[in-house]
Image (cartoon, rainbow, N blue to C red):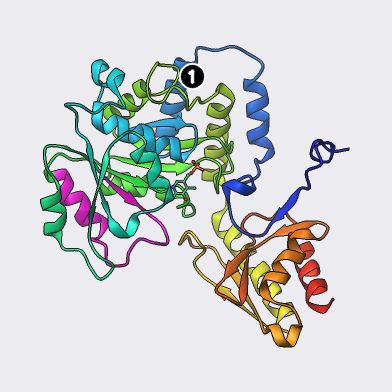
Amino acid sequence: MSIYEELGIRPIINASATLTRLGGSLMPPEVIEAMVEASRHFVDLDELQRRVGEELARLTHNEAAYVSAGAAAGLVLATAACITGTDPAAIRQLPDLTGLKNEVIVHKSHRNGYDHAVRQVGVKLVEIGYATGTAPWELERAINERTAAVFWFQGAMTGRGDLPLETVIEIASARGVPVVVDAAAQLPPVENLWRFTQMGAALAIFSGGKDLRGPQSSGLVVGRKDLIEAIRLNGNPNHSIGRPMKVGKEEMVGLLAAVKRYLALDHEARASQDEEVVAGWCAALNQIPGVKAERSFPNEAGQPLPRARVTFDAAQIGLSRDEVVARLAQGTPSIAVALAGADGIYLNPMTLADGEEQVVLDRLLAVLQG
Ligand SMILES: *Cc1c(COP(=O)(O)O)cnc(C)c1O
């Protein structure tokens, strides 16, 4: 009996995305082996964080790097670091911002659930811009002596009416204000691990538990040496705002193993394999009357991997879209898919193990022809 069956939990085939609520992603053997090995010995945690950080920085062509307890914890620590620097009194004072910088600038169009992690430090978000456009003067006027940082949430929501990231970096840097890029789900392309910081962003933050396939509770922060040092001081095991966001020795070496694997991966082969899966799904599903399947690109996070968008004519197939989704979830095995508009779903090969693409297709065909 599997550990999940014993608990009465049904494993799910994830044809949706690298969603935290489904478990993020699955760790490859080399990541698990590194974590198991790390679990066998005591080490000096602060020393390990520094060494792993050095390796991660070297591998990702950055000045410095830090392993956080997920990208969201990276957002908390990055915010704290931009406020306190390495000042021990300021670090101890958080989240009380009396006398400290207490504003973070963000495009109104970038507001999203994850900015709670930034607000958790007690700062006020100062919004700039409209969906129709943002003028450089809006950012210039928003910056003042209370500004700790400008946050940029890279993703599917960026680009519509925003200032270009280059402009944000230029304006903020000229005034000594760091730009922090939340790029949690912005892999692939692998080059994003150094692209934002090479553009001049002070820090870039990635989830370890999404496409990197590291530990689900890990995150990677890369960027400026002084800010990474400030993050380290604001983080575990120091008594600080980051103390509750503990990163274990296993997560640290697990993320390092995951990044090494990711850098060595044949990303072109991986993308063309996903294209083949999507093409195969579309060809089979388009045989069914009342079903239309087509390639959708880029993916939900705006990244360059394909999905299949499958729309249903409820009258013709005799099922609503929601009934199709429910039957996939309740069937054996249980399959999770993403919703597309009012009458469709997305099928995503990104999070499937080899062979699962056929299981997903067979189950969907069975539901549609049921
Ligand atoms: C997933 C995600 C996060 C959080 O990442 P975790 O590693 O789960 O903490 C933050 N920001 C964005 C935009 C994300 O997509």
Identify which residue, 94 or 367, lies in the foreground.
94
Find residue 111 and report its horizontal and vertical position in percent. 35, 54
**Is 117 a magenta residue?**
no
Q: Residue at x 84, y 38 (%)?
A: 2
Quadrant of res 348: bottom right
Find residue 110 and report its horizontal and vertical position in percent. 34, 56
Horizontally, residue 227 falls left or right of residue 56, namely left
Find residue 275 and report its horizontal and vertical position in percent. 61, 68
Instruction: Quadrant for the C terminus, please.
Output: bottom right
Instruction: Quadrant for the N terminus, please.
Output: top right
Q: Residue at x 67, y 77 (%)?
A: 282
Q: Residue at x 68, y 67 (%)?
A: 277
Question: What's drawn in magenta, residue-wise?
Answer: 150-173
Task: State whether residue 208 is above or below residue 138.
Answer: above
Quadrant of res 148: top left
Identify which residue, 348 or 134, lies in the foreground.
134
Residue type at tag 1: Leu
Horizontally, residue 162 falls left or right of residue 352, namely left
Badge 1: residue crowd in 10 Å (few <14, some 14–19, many ≥20): some
Horizontally, residue 283 falls left or right of residue 72, namely right
